[in-house]
């Protein structure tokens, strides 16, 4: 085989490989463009965001009771009394009740006192 024939066969093989790769690349890009064209709508990412309005609503909960400031419990942790309002003012107003009471829990400005049984 002559050198000229060998080089021409090599060039033909290279061109054929290039044609195959170009065809596959074109086919892939055409498929991708077709899929994008069918899935994108005017309301998707191409829409104008300035037309959208933010959500504005108010949530009203009427049936939820207010949490008590101070809760008094007995030795079996049964609720004896619940006080609503300012803790310091309640302690001054009901000073005789809190004389025998022991603070057992405090969380988020809510207090729970244990009332010792009367002897």
Image: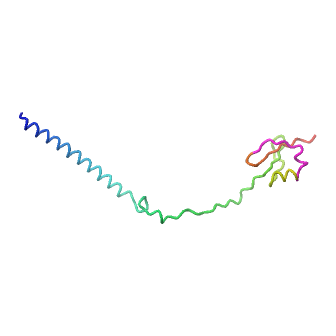
Q: Residue at x 66, y 61 (%)?
A: 60
In the rendered structure, the answer to whether residue 61 lies left or right of residue 54 reads right
Q: Is residue 18 magenta?
A: no
Q: Residue furthest top?
A: 1
In the rendered structure, the answer to whether residue 41 lies left or right of residue 57 reads left
Image quadrant in which the N terminus is located: top left
Specify the segment rendered in magenta: 93-106
Report the label total. Answer: 0
Q: Residue at x 10, y 36 (%)?
A: 6
Along the viewing direction, whichever of 12 and 61 lies nearer the viewer: 12
Q: Residue furthest bottom?
A: 51
Q: Residue at x 16, y 40 (%)?
A: 13
Q: Is residue 25 above or below residue 119?
A: below
Rendering coords of residue 65 (x, y %): 74, 56
Q: Is residue 95 magenta?
A: yes
Q: Residue furthest right?
A: 119
Image quadrant in which the C terminus is located: top right
Rendering coords of residue 100 (x, y %): 89, 43
Q: Residue furthest left?
A: 2
Along the viewing direction, whichever of 14 and 64 lies nearer the viewer: 14
Rendering coords of residue 88 (x, y %): 83, 51
In the rendered structure, the answer to whether residue 118 lies left or right of residue 108 reads right
In the rendered structure, the answer to whether residue 95 lies left or right of residue 22 reads right
């Amino acid at each position: 085989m002559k050198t000229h024939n060998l080089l021409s066969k090599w060039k033909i093989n290279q061109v054929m490989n290039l044609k195959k790769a170009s065809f596959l690349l074109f086919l892939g890009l055409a498929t991708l463009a077709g899929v994008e064209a069918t899935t994108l709508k005017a309301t998707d990412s191409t829409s104008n965001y300035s037309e959208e309005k933010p959500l504005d609503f108010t949530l009203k909960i009427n049936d939820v009771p207010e949490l008590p400031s101070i809760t008094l419990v007995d030795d079996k942790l049964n609720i004896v009394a619940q006080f609503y309002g300012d803790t310091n003012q309640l302690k001054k107003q009901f000073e005789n009740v809190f004389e025998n009471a022991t603070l057992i829990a405090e969380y988020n400005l809510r207090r729970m006192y244990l009332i010792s049984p009367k002897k």
